Image (spheres, rainbow, N blue to C red):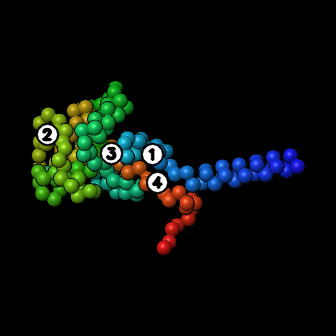
């Protein structure tokens, strides 16, 4: 009888544990290779692309080029980039989403259709040379912002909002209807 009871308890425990592992959401976590900061995940590319190619590459992996809307966020990105490029920072630049492609000198975050209210320009930037219409976190300026030619291949940063917590009653793989 004891063995049966024990088996019952163990079975119940396993079922409960199994159920929990399938429905516990991955709140606050990022996919492998992405870095978490506040409510977002960031991917720092290892390859170089032009700005439009970089925006497309981010979309393919369900994200956009990063938008920077607060001083905290720009500090995080600069600190991370200065950390990984401590020995070679002037050689690197990272595209983010800002651009003045629509109206010259009117900078916006096109992915979220908002003006760039918070800026962190490097010295002499935006220099607004002909067709410098895309926003680079510039290694030579310790990753402060600069406007630069969109066609030049640089590294880039994708940003994805941390996944929303799914319905706790919904098992993985199932879709709610009604
Ligand atoms: Ca421009
Ligand atoms: Ca410039």
Residues at discs 4 and 1 in contact (Cβ within 8 Å): no
Q: Which of 161 and 140 is in front in this view?
A: 161
Pointer 1 residue: 28
**Within-10-Å neighbours for mark 4: few <14, some 14–19, many 20+:** few
Q: Is mark 2 within 8 Å of ligand 2?
A: yes
x then y, percent, for residue 46: 40, 42
Residue at 37% across / 32% down in the picture? 84
Residue reaching furthest to the bottom:
178
Residue reaching furthest to the top:
87
Q: Nearer the viewer, mark 1 or mark 3?
A: 1
Residue at 75% across / 51% down in the picture? 11
Pointer 3 residue: 156
Pointer 4 residue: 165
Pointer 2 residue: 125
Residue at 28% across / 35% down in the picture? 75
x then y, percent, for residue 45: 38, 44
x then y, percent, for residue 69: 24, 46
Q: Earlier in the sequence, mark 4 or mark 1?
A: 1
Q: Is residue 18 above or below residue 38?
A: below
Q: Which of marks 1 and 2 is nearer the N terminus?
A: 1
Please say whether residue 123 is visible from this viewpoint.
Answer: yes
Estimate the spatial distance between the alpha carbons at disc 4 and disc 1, rounded to whole Å.
Answer: 9 Å
Q: Which of 73 and 131 is in front in this view?
A: 73
Q: Earlier in the sequence, mark 1 or mark 3?
A: 1
**Within-10-Å neighbours for mark 1: few <14, some 14–19, many 20+:** some
Estimate the spatial distance between the alpha carbons at disc 1 and disc 2, rounded to whole Å.
Answer: 35 Å
Q: In this view, does 87 lie to the left or right of 117?
A: right
Q: Nearer the viewer, mark 4 or mark 2?
A: 4
């Amino acid at each position: 009888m004891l063995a049966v009871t024990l088996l019952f308890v163990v079975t119940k425990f396993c079922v409960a544990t199994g159920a929990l592992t399938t429905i516990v959401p991955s709140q606050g976590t990022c996919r492998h290779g992405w870095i978490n900061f506040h409510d977002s995940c960031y991917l720092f590319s290892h390859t170089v692309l032009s700005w439009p190619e970089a925006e497309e590459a981010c979309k393919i992996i369900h994200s956009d080029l990063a938008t920077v809307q607060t001083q905290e966020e720009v500090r995080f990105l600069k600190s991370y980039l200065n950390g990984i490029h401590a020995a070679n920072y002037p050689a690197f630049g990272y595209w983010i989403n800002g651009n003045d492609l629509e109206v010259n000198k009117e900078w916006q975050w096109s992915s979220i259709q908002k003006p760039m209210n918070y800026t962190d320009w490097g010295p002499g930037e935006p220099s607004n040379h002909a067709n410098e219409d895309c926003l680079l976190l510039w290694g030579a300026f310790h990753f402060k912002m600069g406007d630069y030619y969109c066609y030049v291949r640089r590294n880039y940063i994708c940003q994805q909002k941390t996944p929303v917590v799914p319905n706790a009653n919904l098992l993985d793989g199932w879709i709610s209807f009604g």
